[in-house]
Amino acid sequence: MNARRRAVLAAGAAGAAALATGCGSSGGDGGGNAGSPPPSDGGAELARTADVPVGGGTVLKERKIVVTQPTEGEFKAFSAVCTHASCLVSTVSDGAIGCPCHGSRFSITDAAVEAGPATRPLPAVRISVSGGAIRRA
Ligand code: FES
């Protein structure tokens, strides 16, 4: 019984440590935690506007960014790292960005949480759009 209790306590401590690691700091001061937007890469082209469907979006897995077009001609970009436990979001459908790990969904307009377990929106990534190219701002 005692051994079992210790095992449960140990698992609880490991879970708490994982939770702390997964959440990182939430100060929003760009400390490089998992939930922060990826670092800027000098205005590199992320995508072509024609590749981002109106009312939907495109997940750029290698850059860990999701680009959306909530209404025609309006483009947004967010970190693709889920604020719940740092999985990469993988889908954009029905006006929401979806995370495959635990089912969180985020608005394509402002990345607000539409369904948990995530509680914080995806951090915004600044972009500029010109000549059909979407770039980091
Ligand atoms: S990591 Fe995305 S829902 Fe848990």
Image (tube, rainbow, N blue to C red):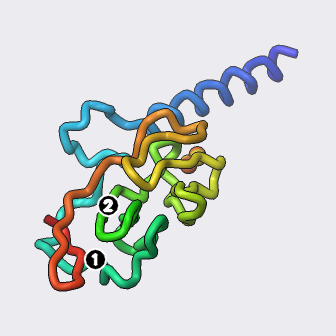
Q: In which quarter of the image is residue 132?
A: bottom left
Residue sitting nearer the eye, 4 or 83: 83
Q: Quadrant of residue 24?
A: top left
Say what secondary structure mark 2 lies in.
strand
Residue at the location (45% across, 75% down)?
Answer: 53
Numbered mark located on residue 46 in the image: 1
Q: Position of residue 113 (x, y in %)?
A: 49, 40
Q: In which quarter of the image is residue 48?
A: bottom left
Q: Position of residue 35 (x, y in %)?
A: 37, 46
Residue at the location (19% across, 73% down)?
Answer: 129
Give the residue type at disc 1.
Leu
Q: Where is residue 55 in the image (x, y as percent from the top left)?
A: 47, 65
Give the residue type at disc 2.
Ala
How far apart marks 2 and 1 lie (CA) works out to 10 Å
C-beta proximity under 8 Å, tags 2 and 1: yes
Quadrant of the rendering where the C terminus is positioned: bottom left
Horizontally, is 49 left or right of 2 in the view?
left
N-term-proximal mark, 2 vs 1? 1
Quadrant of the rendering where the N terminus is positioned: top right
Horizontally, is 36 left or right of 114 in the view?
left
